[in-house]
C-alpha cells in the first residue's frame, strides 16, 4: 500500500488509518470490549441490583454451555472453516447422557465418557471429509446437524429428567465466591476450558498452526506445517466441545432434551464474530469469544431486568450487532485486487 | 566454481505437452543465476521440479554431488533448497518472528513448555540483521511492505540454513529503491556462498545482478551463458527464437503509414506495480501492435484500456471525448472488446455451451430483460462456428470440452458477435495451429478494413510485424518506443525490445 | 430445465442435425434424470410395500390421498427451493428463507387478527385481502433487498450476510406478533393454505403457477444465462460485461419473495402465526432440494425443474416414513446421508479416489 497516492480521498485514508490501527492492536476485539462495557454500564445505571457480583457471575454461568460450544467453534473459524453441527450435537449429547443414566443404568461417568468420545469422533469424520475430499465445511457440518438431531430424537422425543444422585450432586455444586455469590460447576468448566484453549492457542505450536492454516493454507503447506492434522484436529476438538456443552446443559438443567440447542449454532457463530474473530480465518481468539458470550449474556440479563421487554429483542440486538461487526470487519479487510 | 545444485536431462511430460525436454541446469555456489524464457518456455515447470512441487519423468538431480529427489516443497526445504515466491508465502496475520519460526518454534523447559517467545524474537532479529533489516519482529507480517515481507521470507530460508535460494519473480511488485535493497541483499548472500536462482522478466535487472543466464524456450535449453558475455540482443533473440542475423529487413509492403484520425487515445495511462504511464493512440480501422517480452506490461496495458483494472493515472479519450470507464461494462458500451490471454481464468464460462459463450457479451450489453431469441442465438453460433472453423459438431456442447485453440476462437466469436469498434487481442494465437493462425489473421484484417480498430498483443514478433501498421514497444513495464510504417520490421522490434 | 433444453423443437433439417439434437436432449435430461430416478424408486417402493399409498379418493369433489398430500405439503419447500436454486447458481446461498417465511406470516396474521399489543395494530386493512398480501410480501421484498445489497454491494460472504437475517428475522417476527401466536378467522386468506380449486389443493395450484412464472421469467429472459455466467466464472463474466451485482440482487429478492409466499401459505394453513416453528430448518431442505436437483453448489449451471423434483423427493421420503410408521426422526438421518453423499459425488477428489481404486482393481 503506497502512501504516495495523490488521489487518496478522505474516505480511503480514513480506511487506511483504521487498518493501521487494526494491524497494530486488536481493533475489533477492542471494539467488542467497548460495546460490552457500554451495555454493561448502561444496564448497571438503569437497573437497580444489576451491579452485583452474582449478576456478573451469572453472565458467565447462565451462558456457559453456549460459551463452551463457542470456544470449539472459535478454533474452527480461526482455521478457516465453520461448524453448523454444534447445536445438534448439544441436543444429542444431552438426551444420550440423560437416557443412559436414567433408563439404561449406566454410570454417569461412562455415559459422559462415551458422549465425549462420540462427539470427538463425529468431529474427526467431518474434518476428514472436509480436508481430504475438499468438501465445503458448511455442507458437511450441515449433514452433521441433521444426523445428530435425528439420532437425538430417535433416542427420545421426550425430555428426560436426571435423578441420579451423583449427577444431582454435581449439578447443584457451586463454587462459593464470598458474600452470597456462587459460581456453578458449568461456569467453572467454561472458565477452565477457556484458560486451557487460550494458553494453547497463544503459546503452543499447534495453536499457532491453527492461525497459520486459517491465515493462508497454501503457505502453511509450503512451510511444512501439519495442515491435515491441524484441520482435522480442530473439527475433532469442536465436536468434543459441543459434546461437553451438551453435558453442561444436563448439569445446568438436570435433564436431557433432544431439542436443546436448536439454533444455538447461530448464537455461537454470532458470539465468535462479535468477539472479533474473522470469518475468513486466521485472526481472533478465544478471549474475544468470551467477550462475545458476555455481550450475549448482558443483553439477555438487561432484557430480563427490564421485564416489559421480551426476549426477542435479544435476537434483534444480536442481529444488529452481528451486522455492525461484519461490516466493520469488511472495512478492515485488505483490499483485494481484481484477478 | 563449485556446483551446488545441478540437474541433468530433466524431462516432464503433461498430457499433450512436453513441458520440459531433457534440460540441464547448474546453480553454482556464490553465483546469481538468472533463468529466462517466454511463455511456455518451461521456466516454472523447472522451478517446480527443483522445489519438489512436480515429479519428473526422466533425469537426475544432484546437490553438492549427491543425488537427490525432492518429493514435496517441504522435502526440498529439508534438503536446503528454499524458495521465495512472487506472492510471498507467509501467514499475513502472524508476527514476523512466528513466520520465521513456524514449524520449528523453540520451546521452554527442554521442549515441554510453551513457545519460548523471547528466544524466537531474539533469533528472528538476528536472522533479519544478517540481511541488514531492522524491524519490530513482533508485528504482524501484513503491516510491512511486500519488499520487507520478502526479506522475512528470505530470513526464514536462511535460518533453515538453505544452500540454494530460488527467487521466483521477486521484483514484480517492488519499486526501484526496494529492488536495490533486494539486490544488495542478494550480493551479500552470494558472497556468503549461497547459490541463488533468479527468475524475472526484467532485462535490466537480469544484467544488474546476474552472473550467469540460462535461457529456455519451448521446454528446451537454448543456452547457458555468462551474463557479461551475452549481449542483450542475443538474449532476446534466444528467448523469442528468432535469430537477428537471419531476419529480413523489409516489412509488409502495402502498409498505410499515414496516421489516421485517432479513435481511441490514452494519455499518461498507468498503474503502479503494473505498467508505467504511457501514451497510446489507435486510429479507426488501424491495427496497432503491443510488443514486448512476457511481463513487460503488455497485458497490463490492455487491461487498463478495457477498465478491467483501475488506472491510477491518465485519461482515455474516445472520438475526442474524455471517458471515465470505471469497469468493463462501460468500456463494452463504447464498443471495446477484450480477448484475454488467460482464457481458462478470464475467458471461458466452462460449463456453459459454445452458443451461450458466444452470445453472452452481446446479451449482457442488451440487458437481461431483452433476450436474444434462441433462434437468433443459434444462427449466430452456427455462423461463427463456420466462419472461425471452430471444430465442433454441436454448438450446445459445454465449451470446456473444446481444445484450447477452439476455445480461443469461441471467445473471439463472442466479441465479434458484439460488433466491436475496438478489439483488443491478447495473445490470440497462442497454442493454436498454423492454419487457425492464418484464419484469425485474415479475419481480423478483413474486419479492420471494414473500420474496426485492433490492438494486437503477441509474443510472436513475426505476426506483429506482418499484421500491424504501428507497433508500441514495451520493456520492463515502460513504453520504450513506437515504430510505424516501413519501420515495422521484426528486426526493428527485436532491437527495441532488447534495448 | 436449461435453455439448452430438449423441449425446443429443432428447426434445422433433421438428417444433418440428428446427432446434435440427441446430445442436446441428453445434456438437459442428465440433470433431471437422477432426481427423477430417485423419486421413481421411492414411489416404486411404496407401490410394492405401502398399502394404500397410491389410493386417491374423491370426497366432496376434492381429491385426497398420500400422493395429493405429498404435493400439497411439499409446496413450501418447492417454493423455497426455486429461489434457493437461483441464489446457489450465482455462487451464493440464502440461509434466511425460514426466517423470512416466519416474518411474512407474522405480518399477515397480525394485519388480519390485529392483536392489541402488536405494533401492526394501527393498520386497519383486515378487510382487504390484496392489501394484506401486498404488505406482507413487501416485507419479504425488503428482506431480499437487505440480503442482496449486503452480498452484491458490500460483497459480504453470502453465508454471513444471510445469517444476519436468519438470526434477527425471527426476532423481528416476534416483535410483530409481540411474542404471541395470533390466531385468526379469515376465510379468503385461509383459502391460500387449505382451499381447494378444481378438486385440487389451492397451495398446489398456486405453487405450480408460480413455478411456471419463475421458469418463464428466468428462462424466457436472459436472466438464466447471466446467472449461470456469474456463477460459473465470475472473472470471465465481468470481462464479458455481465453486471454481477444486479443479477445477484434480483436472485436474492426472488428468493425472499418466494419465501414470503411460502410463509403466507404455511400461516394460512394453520390459521395462526407460529413464529418459532414456521419454516424452521426449511432453508436446509431447500438447499438439499436444489442439490438433489442437480444444481452445483459451487454455482453455475442450475435446473429449476430439478429443484422441483428434488423438493418432491424430500417430501415423498418424509411421507413414506410417516406412512410406514417408522420413527419420523429417521428422515433427518437419511437427509444427513443424502447431503454427504451429494457432496462426495460433486467432489473431484472423491472421483479421483474412485478412479484410482478402479485402476488398482484392474491391475
Image: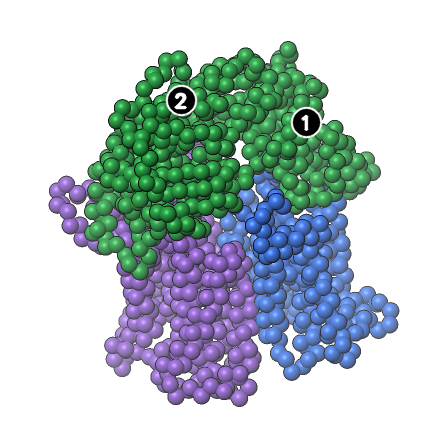
Chain colours: A blue, B green, C purple
For mark 2, what is the residue?
B492
Instruction: Identify the residue at image location x=54%, y=76%.
Output: C174
Residue in front for this viewpoint, B199 or C335: B199
Q: Secondary structure at mark 1?
A: helix
Q: Is residue B20 above or below residue C58?
A: above
Q: Give the residue at the far front of this rendering.
A: B258
Residue in front for this viewpoint, A46 or A298: A46
In terms of image quadrants, where is residue B63? Answer: top right
Chain under disc 1: B
Question: What is the number of the mark on residue A74?
Answer: none
Q: Is residue B14 above or below residue C46?
A: above
Separation of marks 2 and 1 at Cα, in angstroms: 37 Å
Q: Relative to residue A268, is residue C2 drawn left or right? A: left
For mark 1, what is the residue?
B185
Location of residue B173 in the rendering, given as x and y in whole percent from the top left corner = 57, 36
Q: Tell which tag, 2 or 1, sits nearer the viewer.
A: 2
In terms of image quadrants, where is residue B464? Answer: top left
Instruction: Identify the residue at image location x=60%, y=35%.
Output: B175
Q: Is residue B147 above or below residue A183?
A: above
Q: Relative to residue C126, is residue C121 drawn left or right? A: right
Q: Relative to residue C107, is residue A257 drawn left or right? A: right
Location of residue A70 in the rendering, given as x and y in whole percent from the top left corner = 65, 58
Instruction: Identify the residue at image location x=47%, y=78%.
Output: C107
Q: Give the residue at the far top of this rendering.
A: B1
How packed mark 2 is, by other alpha carbons closer than 10 Å (few <14, some 14-19, many 20 or more), is: some
Location of residue C122 in the rendering, given as x and y in whole percent from the top left corner = 50, 87
- Quarter holding the N terminus of chain A is top right
Q: Earlier in the sequence, mark 2 or mark 1?
A: 1
Q: Is residue A145 above or below residue A336?
A: below
Amino acid at each position: 500500500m503506497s502512501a504516495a497516492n495523490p488521489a487518496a480521498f478522505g474516505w480511503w485514508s480514513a480506511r487506511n488509518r483504521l487498518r493501521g490501527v487494526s494491524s497494530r492492536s486488536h481493533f475489533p476485539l477492542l471494539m467488542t470490549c467497548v460495546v460490552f462495557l457500554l451495555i454493561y454500564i448502561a444496564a448497571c445505571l438503569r437497573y437497580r441490583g444489576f451491579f452485583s457480583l452474582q449478576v456478573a457471575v451469572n453472565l458467565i454461568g447462565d451462558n456457559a454451555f453456549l460459551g463452551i460450544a463457542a470456544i470449539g467453534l472459535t478454533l474452527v473459524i480461526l482455521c478457516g472453516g465453520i461448524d453448523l453441527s454444534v447445536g445438534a450435537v448439544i441436543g444429542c449429547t444431552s438426551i444420550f447422557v440423560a437416557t443412559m443414566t436414567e433408563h439404561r443404568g449406566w454410570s454417569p461417568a461412562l455415559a459422559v465418557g462415551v458422549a465425549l468420545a462420540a462427539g470427538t469422533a463425529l468431529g474427526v469424520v467431518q474434518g476428514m471429509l472436509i480436508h481430504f475430499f475438499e468438501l465445503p465445511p458448511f455442507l458437511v457440518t450441515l449433514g452433521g446437524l441433521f444426523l445428530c438431531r435425528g439420532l437425538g430424537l430417535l433416542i427420545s422425543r421426550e425430555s428426560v429428567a436426571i435423578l441420579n444422585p451423583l449427577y444431582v450432586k454435581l449439578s447443584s455444586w457451586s463454587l462459593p465466591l464470598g458474600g452470597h455469590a456462587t459460581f456453578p460447576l458449568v461456569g467453572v468448566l467454561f472458565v477452565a476450558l477457556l484458560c486451557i484453549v487460550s494458553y494453547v492457542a497463544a503459546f503452543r505450536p499447534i495453536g499457532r498452526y491453527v492461525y497459520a492454516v486459517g491465515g493462508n493454507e497454501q503457505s502453511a503447506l509450503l512451510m511444512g506445517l501439519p495442515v491435515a492434522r491441524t484441520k482435522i484436529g480442530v473439527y475433532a476438538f469442536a465436536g468434543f466441545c459441543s459434546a461437553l456443552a451438551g453435558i453442561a446443559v444436563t448439569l445446568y438443567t438436570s435433564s436431557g432434551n433432544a431439542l436443546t440447542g436448536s439454533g444455538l449454532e447461530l448464537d455461537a457463530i454470532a458470539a465468535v464474530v462479535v468477539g472479533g474473530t474473522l470469518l475468513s480465518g486466521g485472526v481472533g481468539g478465544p478471549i474475544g469469544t468470551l467477550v462475545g458470550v458476555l455481550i450475549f449474556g448482558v443483553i439477555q440479563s438487561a432484557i430480563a431486568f427490564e421485564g416489559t421487554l421480551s426476549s426477542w429483542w435479544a435476537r434483534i440486538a444480536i442481529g444488529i450487532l452481528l451486522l455492525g461487526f461484519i461490516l466493520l470487519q469488511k472495512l478492515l479487510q485488505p483490499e483485494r485486487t481484481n484477478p | 566454481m563449485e556446483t551446488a545444485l545441478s540437474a541433468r536431462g530433466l524431462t516432464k511430460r503433461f498430457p499433450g505437452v512436453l513441458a520440459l525436454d531433457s534440460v540441464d541446469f547448474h546453480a553454482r555456489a556464490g553465483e546469481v543465476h538468472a533463468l529466462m524464457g517466454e511463455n511456455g518456455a518451461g521456466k516454472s515447470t523447472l522451478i517446480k521440479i527443483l522445489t519438489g512441487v512436480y515429479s519428473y519423468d526422466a533425469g537426475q538431480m544432484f546437490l553438492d554431488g549427491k543425488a537427490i529427489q525432492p518429493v514435496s516443497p517441504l522435502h526440498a526445504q529439508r534438503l536446503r533448497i528454499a524458495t521465495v515466491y512472487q506472492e510471498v508465502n507467509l501467514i499475513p496475520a502472524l508476527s514476523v518472528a512466528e513466520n520465521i519460526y513456524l514449524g520449528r518454534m523453540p520451546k521452554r523447559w527442554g521442549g515441554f513448555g510453551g513457545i519460548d517467545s523471547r528466544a524466537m524474537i531474539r533469533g528472528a532479529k538476528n536472522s533479519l540483521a544478517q540481511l541488514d533489516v531492522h524491524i519490530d519482529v513482533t508485528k504482524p507480517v501484513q503491516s510491512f511492505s511486500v519488499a520487507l515481507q520478502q526479506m522475512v521470507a528470505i530470513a526464514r530460508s536462511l535460518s533453515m540454513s538453505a544452500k540454494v535460494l530460488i527467487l521466483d519473480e521477486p521484483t514484480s511488485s517492488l519499486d526501484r529503491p526496494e529492488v536495490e535493497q533486494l539486490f544488495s541483499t542478494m550480493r551479500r548472500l552470494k558472497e556468503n556462498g549461497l547459490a541463488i536462482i533468479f527468475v524475472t522478466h526484467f532485462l535490466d535487472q537480469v544484467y544488474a545482478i546476474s552472473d550467469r543466464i540460462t535461457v529456455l524456450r519451448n521446454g528446451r535449453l537454448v543456452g547457458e551463458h555468462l551474463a557479461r558475455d551475452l549481449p542483450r540482443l542475443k538474449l532476446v533473440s534466444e528467448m523469442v527464437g528468432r535469430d537477428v542475423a537471419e531476419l529480413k529487413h523489409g516489412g509488409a509492403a502495402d502498409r498505410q503509414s499515414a496516421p489516421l484520425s485517432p479513435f481511441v487515445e490514452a494519455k499518461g495511462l498507468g498503474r503502479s506495480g503494473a505498467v508505467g504511464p504511457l501514451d497510446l493512440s489507435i486510429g479507426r480501422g488501424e491495427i496497432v501492435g503491443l510488443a514486448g517480452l512476457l511481463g513487460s506490461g503488455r497485458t497490463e496495458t490492455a487491461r487498463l484500456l478495457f477498465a478491467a483494472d483501475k488506472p491510477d493515472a491518465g485519461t482515455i479519450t474516445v472520438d475526442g471525448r474524455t471517458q471515465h470507464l470505471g469497469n468493463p461494462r462501460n468500456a463494452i458500451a463504447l464498443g471495446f472488446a477484450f480477448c484475454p490471454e488467460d482464457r481458462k481464468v478470464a475467458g471461458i464460462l466452462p460449463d456453459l455451451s459454445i452458443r451461450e459463450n458466444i452470445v453472452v457479451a452481446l446479451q449482457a450489453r442488451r440487458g437481461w430483460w431483452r433476450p436474444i431469441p434462441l433462434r437468433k442465438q443459434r444462427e449466430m453460433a452456427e455462423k461463427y462456428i463456420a466462419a472461425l472453423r471452430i471444430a465442433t459438431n454441436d454448438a450446445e456442447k459445454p465449451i470446456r470440452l473444446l481444445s484450447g485453440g477452439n476455445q480461443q476462437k469461441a471467445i473471439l466469436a463472442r466479441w465479434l458477435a458484439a460488433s466491436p469498434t475496438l478489439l483488443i487481442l491478447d495473445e490470440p494465437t497462442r497454442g493454436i495451429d498454423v492454419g487457425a493462425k492464418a484464419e484469425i489473421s485474415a479475419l481480423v484484417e478483413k474486419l479492420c478494413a471494414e473500420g474496426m480498430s485492433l490492438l494486437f498483443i503477441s509474443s510472436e514478433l513475426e505476426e506483429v510485424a506482418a499484421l500491424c501498421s504501428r507497433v508500441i514497444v514495451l520493456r520492463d513495464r515502460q513504453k520504450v518506443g513506437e515504430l510505424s510504417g516501413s519501420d515495422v520490421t521484426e528486426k526493428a522490434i527485436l532491437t527495441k525490445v532488447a534495448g | 430445465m436449461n435453455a439448452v433444453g430438449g423441449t425446443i423443437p429443432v428447426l434445422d433439417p433433421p438428417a444433418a442435425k440428428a446427432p446434435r439434437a440427441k446430445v442436446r436432449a441428453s445434456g438437459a435430461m442428465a440433470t433431471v434424470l437422477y432426481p427423477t430416478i430417485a423419486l421413481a424408486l421411492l414411489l416404486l417402493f411404496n407401490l410394492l410395500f405401502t398399502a394404500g399409498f397410491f389410493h386417491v379418493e374423491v370426497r366432496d369433489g376434492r381429491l385426497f390421498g398420500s400422493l395429493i398430500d405429498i404435493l400439497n405439503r411439499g409446496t413450501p419447500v418447492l417454493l423455497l427451493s426455486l429461489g434457493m436454486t437461483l441464489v446457489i447458481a450465482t455462487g451464493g446461498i440464502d440461509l434466511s428463507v425460514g426466517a423470512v417465511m416466519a416474518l411474512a406470516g407474522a405480518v399477515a396474521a397480525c394485519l388480519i387478527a390485529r392483536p392489541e399489543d402488536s405494533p401492526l395494530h394501527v393498520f386497519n386493512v383486515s378487510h382487504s385481502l390484496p392489501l394484506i398480501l401486498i404488505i406482507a410480501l413487501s416485507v419479504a421484498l425488503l428482506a431480499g433487498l437487505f440480503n442482496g445489497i449486503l452480498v452484491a454491494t458490500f460483497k459480504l460472504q453470502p453465508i454471513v450476510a444471510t445469517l444476519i437475517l436468519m438470526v434477527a428475522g425471527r426476532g423481528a417476527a416476534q416483535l410483530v406478533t409481540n411474542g404471541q401466536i395470533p390466531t385468526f378467522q379469515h376465510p379468503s386468506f385461509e383459502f391460500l393454505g387449505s382451499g381447494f380449486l378444481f378438486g385440487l389443493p389451492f397451495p398446489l395450484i398456486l405453487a405450480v403457477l408460480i413455478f411456471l412464472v419463475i421458469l418463464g421469467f428466468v428462462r424466457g429472459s436472459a436472466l438464466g444465462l447471466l446467472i449461470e455466467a456469474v456463477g460459473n466464472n465470475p472473472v470471465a463474466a465481468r470481462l464479458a460485461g455481465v453486471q454481477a451485482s444486479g443479477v445477484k440482487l434480483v436472485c436474492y429478492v426472488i428468493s425472499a419473495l418466494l419465501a414470503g409466499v411460502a410463509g403466507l401459505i404455511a400461516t394460512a394453513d394453520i390459521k395462526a402465526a407460529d413464529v418459532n416453528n414456521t419454516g424452521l430448518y426449511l432453508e436446509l431442505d431447500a438447499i438439499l432440494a436444489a442439490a438433489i436437483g442437480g444444481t452445483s453448489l459451487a454455482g453455475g449451471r442450475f435446473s429449476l425443474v430439478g429443484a422441483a423434483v428434488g423438493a418432491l423427493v424430500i417430501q415423498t421420503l418424509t411421507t413414506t416414513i410417516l406412512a410406514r410408521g417408522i420413527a419420523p426422526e429417521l428422515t433427518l438421518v437419511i437427509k444427513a446421508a443424502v447431503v454427504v453423499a451429494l457432496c462426495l459425488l460433486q467432489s473431484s477428489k472423491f472421483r479421483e479416489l474412485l478412479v484410482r481404486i478402479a485402476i488398482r482393481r484392474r491391475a
